Image (cartoon, helix red, strand yellow):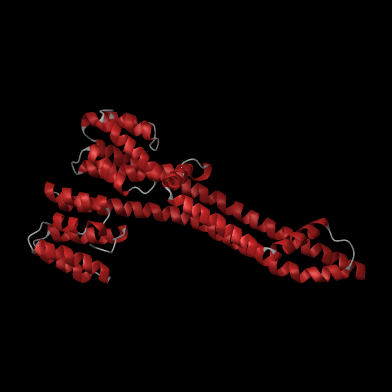
Amino acid sequence: MARYKFNKKELIIFARQLSLMVDSDVSIYLGVEMIKKKMKKPEQKEVIASISKDIKSGMSLADAILDVKDAFNPFFVNMVVFGEKSGNLTKVLLEIVDLYEKELDLKAKIISAVTYPLMVATLMMGVILLLILKIFPMFNQILIESGGTLPALTEGLLSFSTYFAENFLIIFLIIIIIVSIYAIYRRTDKGALRVDRLKFQLPIIRKINKLNTAIILSRNIALVIKSGLSISIGLEMITEIVENRHVKEKLEEAIQSVDEGEHFDEVIEDMGFFPELLSNYIAVAFINGKLDTVFDEVADYMQKDIDESLDNLTSIIEPISVIVLSSIVAVILLAVILPVINIINSIG
């Protein structure tokens, strides 16, 4: 039983190397041995060594990969098995490489779009905590000894700073408890489903999540159709690799609808992830036999849409984050400066 799990980046390298070996005059066994020597991680070498050993004993490449299928995602394993049986292994491997490269590129863009806001939010919390826990207490004693009436803003922030500092551990523990309860709830089937559904309902991230899901599903569906698999089998393969419970539920409903004879364009429309016009394109594509082309084109179209959405989101969040951070710091500094000015004026 293989212990190591190849991630998508590693699968891209492995699939590309494997396609070159399959397409050359080198035997599969020697090709896999060459790939094994290039692997850097011992765990990877162990998996490839097992494949090589099985091939040497007379197994096919597909059966050898099935023997260590826990090291790869189910979609990759199924596509390799079907690719070898259909005689299109090289083509299938290259299609997998293209699919995973596009998925990783999309993921990188989404991460890049949310990184800046998270950094600003972290900086904001750091500055606020520094001012409340360190700066304000330094002025507290001076302001009290100076006498006089403190401005309402200063008095309010001083009270909050004192309360926060005295109860910091309690507040921290409450946050830890809330996060822990959420984590436990998130691991339950009911909790995971509700949280995953929520990702498609929140105003800011709803569109991005729908587009991201639609793009991934479109490219995977296009690949299984190109490979000659039936839509029902293809959807089952895709369902195995989907992590979002809500999406998985929708796919399972789609599989049932397809098996019951419902038109695929209606099934796609009922899922709720794809553009409304796609169902019309699918109906036409079924007639002319270009269903895979339609899904590829729709994925490219939605890719441009999500790129634009991410750019717009970043352009909106950046100035708002700066304004909010500047305003909070300005209010805190004002609360410190006002009583200092009063002290100077009283001395004068």
Q: Is residue 348 visible?
A: no
Query: With 287 as the anchor, is 339 left or right in this view?
Result: right
Q: Quadrant of residue 342?
A: bottom right
Question: Is the residue 202 above or below the residue 348 in the image?
Answer: above
Residue drawn at (8%, 61%), measured in percent from left and top?
A: 25
* Residue 142 percent location from the top left of the image: 82, 71
Q: Quadrant of the C terminus?
A: bottom right
* Residue 222 percent location from the top left of the image: 26, 42
Residue drawn at (18%, 55%), measured in percent from left and top?
A: 66
Q: Is residue 283 visible?
A: yes
Question: Is the residue 214 above or below the residue 121 in the image?
Answer: above
* Residue 179 percent location from the top left of the image: 53, 56
Q: Quadrant of the N terminus?
A: bottom left
Asked whether 155 or 21 is in front, the reply is 155
Asked whether 215 or 316 is in front, the reply is 215
Question: Is the residue 224 above or below the residue 260 in the image?
Answer: below
Query: With 48 as the anchor, is 306 left or right in this view?
Result: right
Asked whether 16 or 84 is in front, the reply is 84
Q: Tell how many labels.
A: 0
Question: Is the residue 61 above or below the residue 297 in the image?
Answer: below
* Residue 21 percent location from the top left of the image: 14, 61
Asked whether 57 or 217 is in front, the reply is 57
Q: Quadrant of residue 197?
A: top left
